[in-house]
Every structure is written in C-alpha cells, then in structure tokens.
Amino acid sequence: MAEPFDRAALADFLAGAIEGFHGLRSVEKFAGGQSNPTFKLVAASGSYVLRRKPAGTLLKSAHAIEREYQVMKALAATDVPVPRMLLLCEDESVIGTAFFVMDYLEGRIFWDPALPDLSSEDRAAVYDGMNAALAALHRVDVVSVGLSAFGRPGDYFARQLSRWTDQYRASETGVLSAMDRLIAWLADNLPPDDGRVSLVHGDYRIDNMIFDKNAPRLLALLDWELSTLGHPFADLAYQCMQWRLPNQGRMRGLAGVDRAAIGLPSEAQYVARYCERMGLAGIPNWTFYLAFSFFRLAAILQGVKKRALDGNASNPEAGLKMGEAVPVLAQMAILLIDEGTSP
C-alpha cells in the first residue's frame, strides 16, 4: 500500500459505525485514481470500498470527498446509478484523513472507449446507456433530493474559469504559452449565461463508470469529487473530448477509430441523442464548451503533476506521466479554437 494506515483502528471504528460490519481481513489499494486514494476492504461481512483524501498539503477546495458522499447519498432515490453510501467519517484521527465507505460493486470498468472486447451491439448499448444516464443526471430535481445548496446557480463557466485558472496558477511548474493563450481566449469568449442549471458530475467519462460483468448495463457512476450545481453542457462537452483524444496512452480517446464500423456513435450523433432526451434543438457555442473542457482537464492534470513532484500523489510515477498531457491538451484546444467546430 502506498499510503498505509492503522488497519486495526479502522476495523474497530467500522465495526461500531456500519451495521453488520465485522472481521476486516484485507485492505487493497486500487491502482487507478490520482486524486483521492481508493481501497477495497474485504471483511467477513462482505466487500466494501473506502475512499479517502490524500495525505499532505492540499489545494483549496480540492479532494472534496465530503461532497462526493453527499451527492451520491442524495442520488440514491433517483434514476442516476450510484453505489450505496454507508459512512462518512470526517474524524482524521481514525486513519489520518477524512474518508467515506460505500458498497463494493462487482463489475467492469472500460479503460479503452473503443471497447475492443465487445460486440458492435454491446458497444452501441454502452454508449446509449452513458447518454441516458447523463440526461437523467441533468434532469434531477435538486430541490427534491436536498441538493439545492450544493453550488451557486448561474454564471457557471465564468466561475469555473476563474477557479481553474487559480488552480492552474497555484500548481504551475513552468510557462506554457498555449495554456496562457487558451485562458485568455476563454475569458474573451465567455457565452452569456442562458439560465440553465443542473447537477453536473464534473468528470463524466467512461472510466469513471462501472458496468455489469455480463451485460452492457451501467451499474454506477463514480468519482463525484468535482460535482456541483452547474451548466449541463459542461458535462456533455467534457465527455465529447473523448472523440478527439488519440486512442493510445493513459487517456485514450476515439480519434483515428472507425467508429461507424464498430458500432459507436459519432460525436454529432451522441450530442443529437442527448438533445433528443433533453428536448433541445441543439447546442450553441459548442467550440467554447469543448475548449473549456480541454482547459479544465489540463488544469486538473497540472495539479496531479504538482502533487507528484511534491510527493503527495496517490501514484507519483503515474502522476508525472499524466502531467505530460498538459501541453498536448492545451495545444489541442488551440487547434480547436483556430478551426472552429460544431456538434
């Protein structure tokens, strides 16, 4: 384990805090994930997942596992698939940081969005399931599920641009002219606020989902750290970066893949299906939303790189590798801006 903690203390605490929990046998750190370290707990009473904040000095508002717990707990009674939340512990004396525990779901995580091991029919079903879940998320009545105070409605992109610019500057390790130009372009091209407000996931991509082991059925959306009340088009554009990223390396996309030949929708088809589900005629300002998505992902990965350099990353070697994508993402956004696009 990269970040060991007192298992006996954890076992004692969970036995008194989670009904039926007993006999902690093992704690295994999941290999994926750069933000909040996540562990599989195997006990006599079953299997669980523990997600904690990383050790060390953290950027302001980052690693908000309390918000992750809150939003997944609230979504339990909706059509949005989430794991069952069991416990939030904000007492850092137990394992050194705040953490939460949720059900362990046996299923599949797809790391390659081209889904090479599935049939064309199953590929299409996986993508339609992601599309349906995204629309379901954006239709959630935040008042009825108790999330009306989960964020500030309105001016989402202006606030997010300010937040992630600050985060990027705080973790900057060198001058990147493409990022500087991108930040300036986004500030100059902010679309007027159209009044749309919904719950947003914030990191909506295929490898943050668990699918049934034997069917193309979405079981749960994971990694809600960046969720808030925001603009629904942010989630849609963020996922649609996948169509433009290369199908290689750690952040695989669909660029260069013959999508029609293997049963996957085009970006335009995916967006059109979402619009159909949401009752929309189309998505204006698509270039801005995509460029913003590339910027925000680059800012996130710059933070991962900085934590790796500072020795606070969940997986330092992987963190440094992911940091190599920052200039690539920034340049892709610049090309997008220069060429323009539409869904």
Image (cartoon, grey):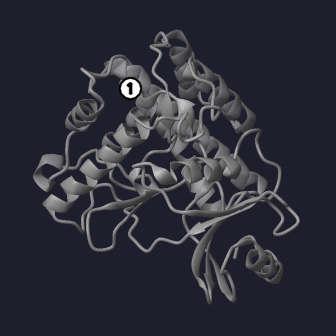
Q: Amino acid at mark 1?
A: Leu
Q: Nearer the viewer, residue 243 or 101?
A: 101
Q: Residue at x 66, y 57 (%)?
A: 36
| Residue 124 position in % (x across, y down) | 19, 53
Outermost residue on the left side: it is 261
Q: Is residue 14 above or below residue 285?
A: below
| Residue 295 position in % (x across, y down) | 52, 31
Q: Nearer the viewer, residue 32 or 203?
A: 203
| Residue 342 position in % (x across, y down) | 27, 23
Counting the numbered discs, the total is: 1
Q: Nearer the viewer, residue 191 or 81?
A: 81
Q: Residue at x 43, y 30 (%)?
A: 232
Task: State which quadrant residue 176 falls in.
Answer: top right
Which part of the image, by quadrant, shows the N terminus? bottom right
Q: Is residue 30 above or below residue 251?
A: below
Q: Residue at x 62, y 54 (%)?
A: 320
The reply to whether residue 342 is visible in this rendering is yes
Which part of the image, by quadrant, shows the C terminus? top left
| 115 relative position to 198: left or right | left
| Residue 198 position in % (x across, y down) | 48, 30
| 302 relative position to 266: left or right | right
Q: Residue at x 58, y 53 (%)?
A: 73
The reply to whether residue 333 is visible in this rendering is no
| 192 relative position to 120: left or right | right
Question: What residue is disc 1 on?
Answer: 335
SS label for mark 1: helix
Outermost residue on the right side: it is 93
Q: Is residue 127 above or below residue 329?
A: below
